């Protein structure tokens, strides 16, 4: 896939916000981005390419947001809570994209061999759980499964409470993180 600019990806996100996946077509994306369909076709872009690109953009935002947490000092339990707060902030920024893909299968990310949209969101949380098991600040039995459960429960519950119930971002993040980490405490 040829690289598309942020204007096109922003257009995809706006369509996802308004209409979900059913609204995505090359014609709709071209119109929303104020470019011609022919331009997108000449760039070799497909709707699936754009779907993966907006998911990868959200994933890259999460990784950038988590990097300071991953390299910080302190126990893993504290860093996990900070990381989950960062996840809530990323969910806030990319909510339309994430909710559009709630029930969609994981996708491979081109140019990132062995990487999937799901793994990209879970990997760093697994690392924090492993760290917590080592430093004794978290109770961990299956880091991969628990990371998937914690990250997904925080992300999806956060988005639901924000969008369906209108809770404030701060209150939602605090309550959801408390709920998701309760079983990990020592």
Image (cartoon, rainbow, N blue to C red):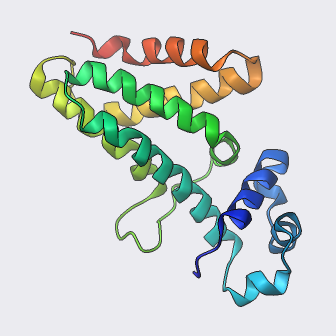
Q: Residue 138: x, y in percent?
A: 22, 19
From this viewpoint, is residue 17 visible?
yes
155 in relation to 111, above or below: above
Residue name at image x 36 percent, y 11 percent: 182
- Judge by depth and name the residue closer to the eye, 156 or 53: 53
Q: Left or right: 74 with respect to 158?
A: left
Where residue 29 appears, as percent x and y from the top left, is: 81, 67
Q: Which residue lies furthest to the bottom in this view?
A: 42
Say if 122 sits above or below 117 in the image: above
Query: Residue 1: horizontal and vertical position, in percent?
Result: 57, 81
Depth order, front residue of 105/61: 61
Q: Disc count in the image?
A: 0
Q: Residue at x 20, y 22 (%)?
A: 74
Picture residue at 54% right of the left edge, 19% below the top: 173
In screen coordinates, is 9 left or right of 184?
A: right
Residue 74 vs residue 79: left or right? Answer: left
**Residue 120 point in image, percent of width and height:** 41, 52
Q: Which of 12 and 106 is in front in this view?
A: 12
Q: Quadrant of the C terminus?
A: top left
Residue 128's quadrant in the figure?
Answer: top left
Which residue occupies 54% across, 38% down? 90
Residue 150 visible in the picture: no
């Amino acid at each position: 896939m040829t690289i598309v600019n942020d204007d096109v990806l922003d257009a995809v996100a706006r369509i996802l916000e308004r209409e979900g996946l059913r609204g995505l077509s090359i014609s709709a994306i071209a119109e929303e981005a104020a470019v011609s369909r022919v331009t997108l076709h000449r760039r070799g872009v497909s709707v699936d390419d754009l779907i993966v690109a907006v998911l990868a953009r959200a994933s890259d935002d999460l990784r950038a947001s988590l990097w300071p947490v991953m390299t910080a000092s302190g126990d893993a339990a504290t860093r996990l809570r900070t990381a989950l707060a960062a996840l809530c902030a990323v969910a806030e920024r990319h909510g339309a994209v994430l909710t559009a893909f709630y029930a969609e299968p994981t996708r491979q990310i081109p140019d990132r061999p062995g990487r999937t949209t799901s793994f990209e969101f879970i990997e760093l949380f697994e690392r924090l759980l492993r760290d917590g098991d080592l430093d004794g600040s978290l109770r961990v039995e299956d880091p991969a499964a628990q990371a998937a459960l914690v990250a997904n429960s925080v992300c999806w519950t956060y988005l639901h409470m924000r969008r369906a119930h209108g809770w404030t971002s701060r209150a939602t993040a605090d309550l959801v993180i408390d709920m998701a980490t309760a079983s990990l405490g020592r």
